[in-house]
Image (spheres, rainbow, N blue to C red):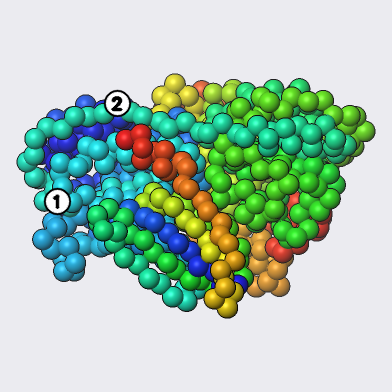
Amino acid sequence: MRVTLEIRMANAEGALERILGRLRQRCFSICSITADRSSDHQFIDAFISVESSRPIEIAAKQIAKLFDVTQVKVHYTEAGVHRGYWQQQTSGQAEARASV
Amino acid sequence: MKGAEILIKALEAEGVDTIFGYPGGAIMPVYDALYDSKLKHILVRHEQAAALAADGYARASGRVGVCLATSGPGATNLLTGIANAFLDSVPMVAITGQVPQSVIGTDAFQEVDVFGLSFPIVKHSFLVRDASELASIVHMAFSIAASGRPGPVLIDLPKDVATADVPEPVFAEPEFVGLQHPEARQLHFAREYIAASARPLIYAGGGIRIAQAASELRSFVEATGIPIVTTLQGLGSIPGEHPLNLGMLGMHGTKAANFAVQSCDLLICVGARFDDRVTGKLAEFAPHARVIHMDADPAEISKLRSADCGVLGDIKTALNFLHVEPEINAWVEECLANKQQFAFSYDAPTEHVYAPRFISRLSQAADENTFISSDVGQHQMWVAQHYQFRRPETHLSSGGLGTMGFGMPAGIGAILANPDARVVTISGDGSIMMNIQELATVKRYKLPLKIVVFDNQALGMVRQWQELFFSERYSEVDLSDNPDFVLVAQAFGIPAIRVEHNHEIDAAIHRILNDDGPLFVHVPIDPRENVWPLVPPGKSNTQMMETTRQ
């Protein structure tokens, strides 16, 4: 199944690399990727299309746990038709960040 | 103030009292700052042992363990210990020296990209670019390591940052972010499931130790009367002797535990993660059960087994809310009958010392303030099966990564975290050689660590699998040319004895529990002895093999 992840992360050293590594390790192959800095350079917004036989929801939660990641949305697409999305705000890590 | 001084002050501000490390070129400014510090630095003899000792310190104390190494090989030697902490959710801050920023990326002497290497095995990692950020980075590292589901955090510190002079920063107080309160709706579902169940079973894991929820778990067990099984990391979450404790489940679990899992109608998973060593063939694990899964990590709930009710957040709160009394008398009687029928027996006549009997006797003689750190292999499973742990933090075992060489460094960490406790490392002749150099650390710091080595002159667990699953083709498992371990220990200045006969066991255990200083106990055992029961790989937990040897 092919889905697209929309991920907002801090514009921090290694942030995108961690996400790509986690996707690879959790058995997702990357079909396409677009990433750019936000206008204020505080964030990176990435759109990553992936394929796998594994459920994307668990992978999305594992990405959402990353300290640099602030938001993950999963877009379920088929032949280019938008079919809704699943969204996860990071919780524990965001709290940790907010507290320091 | 120099960056290195900021690092040391920041560690002190976090309440750190002990760090484990090994100096080298890129970390020298930090060691120079350490010279004037009140921090207790334990000089190990291999960086891997620094990380494993920090891990043992953290497991035994509930505090964040700290280790320190130089760049390049020092950093890569830490990685196994960092991965070990990651797999078992142990809070740790690992600090590595790095070459100066001006030569990062030039293949400089002892340069390795440990920041990048760390990504799959840490909660987070920092490459410090500016000494003025160092205090807040250290503070964040401790908060991340200890909050939520704990784990290791790496701080990579280039040498020029360590020597940079910046204004003295403000050092924040230690901070721990609490877990979220579980959703009321999920808790009510869980109560309904428990009340409606005729055959419920609790499956408790390492999350109980991490959440310091053993008391709440015991209250839950006793209020509901539900039988309980535990994972390797969950041992001691409920006392081993508790009547409703059916023992460890999984590959080397008890028959009573595995039968209960396979026939329960409700599995209440508390701080465990359906690991493959626990479930056997996943599709056939607890096939008749609805699942309540309580965990602090949202990515664990329904990761491998879909949960009918996921309870995310603070386990203590959840357990306290679930005191209902289901009608389960017949089920409990069935579980307890199995427990009695399939109890381990220690009375088989043996020519050699029988390791399970030795461990069982040690368990009977020891008090609840005795910590056991085990290595990895057959002896590890014998400890899990035959030592009755009373508190979860007293059992230190490398579960997720299965790191041979964990036992002695972890024991060193545990004894430094709890100077008044007894700490016993139980190892094998394969594992002990992985970090045997740490006998020098035991000697140097006069640590009263007791080290028991069960010696079957083989890599016993691998040999067992080759016997059972590889047609007895024993490939590279023979260790019959082991050194004389008593002489080795004595060469390090550690008193050592050999226990070769059953009638010597009690005297040895008396010394293990009462000698003031360290003691190395070499115990030759039957090389043919295996760990039973055993669920073969890929099989369901009902398909337990037992000994075929007469």
Q: Quadrant of the N terminus of chain B?
A: top left
Q: Position of residue B527 (x, y in %)?
A: 64, 56
Query: What is the three-letter code of the residue carrying label 1?
Result: Lys
State the residue at coordinates (40%, 50%): A70
Q: Position of residue A38 (x, y in %)?
A: 29, 59
Q: Which quadrant of the figure has residue A22?
A: bottom left
Q: Position of residue A65 (x, y in %)?
A: 46, 50
Between B159 and B493, the one lying in front of the other is: B159
Outermost residue on the left side: it is: B165
Query: Looking at the image, is A25 positioned above or below residue B222?
Result: below
Q: Is residue B261 visible?
A: no
What secondary structure is found at the residue carrying circle 1?
helix
The subunit letter for the residue under badge 1 reads B
The subunit letter for the residue under badge 2 reads B
Query: Looking at the image, is B105 positioned above or below residue B326?
Result: below
Between A12 and B242, the one lying in front of the other is: A12
